[in-house]
Amino acid sequence: GQQLNQSPQSMFIQEGEDVSMNCTSSSIFNTWLWYKQDPGEGPVLLIALYKAGELTSNGRLTAQFGITRKDSFLNISASIPSDVGIYFCAGPMDSNYQLIWGAGTKLIIKP
Amino acid sequence: DGGITQSPKYLFRKEGQNVTLSCEQNLNHDAMYWYRQDPGQGLRLIYYSQIVNDFQKGDIAEGYSVSREKKESFPLTVTSAQKNPTAFYLCASSILQVSNQPQHFGDGTRLSIL
């Protein structure tokens, strides 16, 4: 079945650093979605990608839809404390309206 | 403002008790979903509904039940058959007509066992 593999599982960064994370699949996806979840809250959509090769920015966040359609990348530039949280990738299954979710990348700011 | 409202924020269940989690949306979305999230894990689909009076099981439906009597509402009941109900429960909705539309989430209900 379709699965999404997110890496890294967690990241410890210094404030001001750039961050990169990715999501890969053994199957082709036509859409990639990136969400962020703060503790005790629901995930919030950050960026949606609909076309292979597409590069989309949302403030300091940039996401890319891989050309093979089997991967996607999320970059955060000049990280700030409020960037901490869990970042999820997701994509729709072929046959219905369900989403497949990655396990998440937890971003932690080093004190 | 349009959005998804989940209530209560925190819920406690006694042994052998059924509890119901509320989810209401005013986004006029056709599809609604319930997910379970355990610490350090991703989201697992419990049930979803694409239209009023119809719903389908997700990956972990055992011990849960839902209803969809109104487009705006999709309550989830955690039954006594669910032996490990402690988790964070998230409700989501999306436009149905296009399969790649993102899901939008409520702020969740945290369920614990007394």
Image: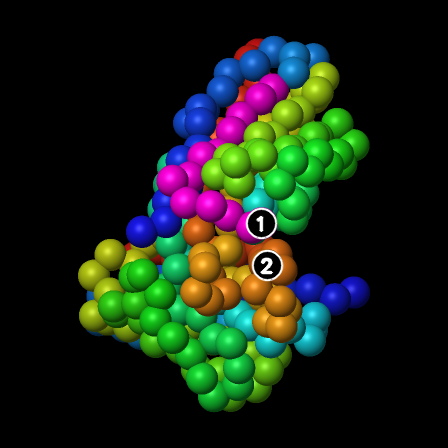
Where does label 1 land, which residue?
A31
For mark 1, name the chain.
Answer: A
Q: Nearer the viewer, residue B111 or B91?
A: B91
Task: Check the image and tell me how it is coloured.
Answer: rainbow
Q: Nearer the viewer, residue A30 or A85?
A: A30
Callout 2 and callout 1 share a chain: no
Amino acid under disc 2: Asn
Res B92 quadrant in image? bottom right
Label 1 secondary element = loop
- Residue at x 45% of width, y 57% of height: A93
Does the magenta portion include A87? no
Q: Is residue A39 above or below residue B27?
A: above
Q: Is residue A47 above or below residue B59?
A: above
Label 2 secondary element = loop
**In the rendered view, does A63 fall on the left or right side of B54?**
right
Q: Say few, some or many: other residues with alpha carbon within 10 Å of mark 2 (under 14 / 14 to 19 / 20 or more).
A: many
Amino acid under disc 1: Thr
Q: Position of residue A108 (x, y in %)?
A: 53, 22
Q: Position of residue A26 (x, y in %)?
A: 38, 40
Where does label 2 land, which residue?
B100
Quadrant location of the C terminus of chain B?
bottom left
Does the magenta portion include A25? yes
Quadrant location of the N terminus of chain B?
bottom right
Question: What span is colored magenta in the figure?
Answer: A19-31
Res B85 quadrant in image? bottom left
- Give the Cα distance between marks 2 and 1: 6 Å
For mark 2, name the chain.
Answer: B
Q: Position of residue A17 (x, y in %)?
A: 65, 12
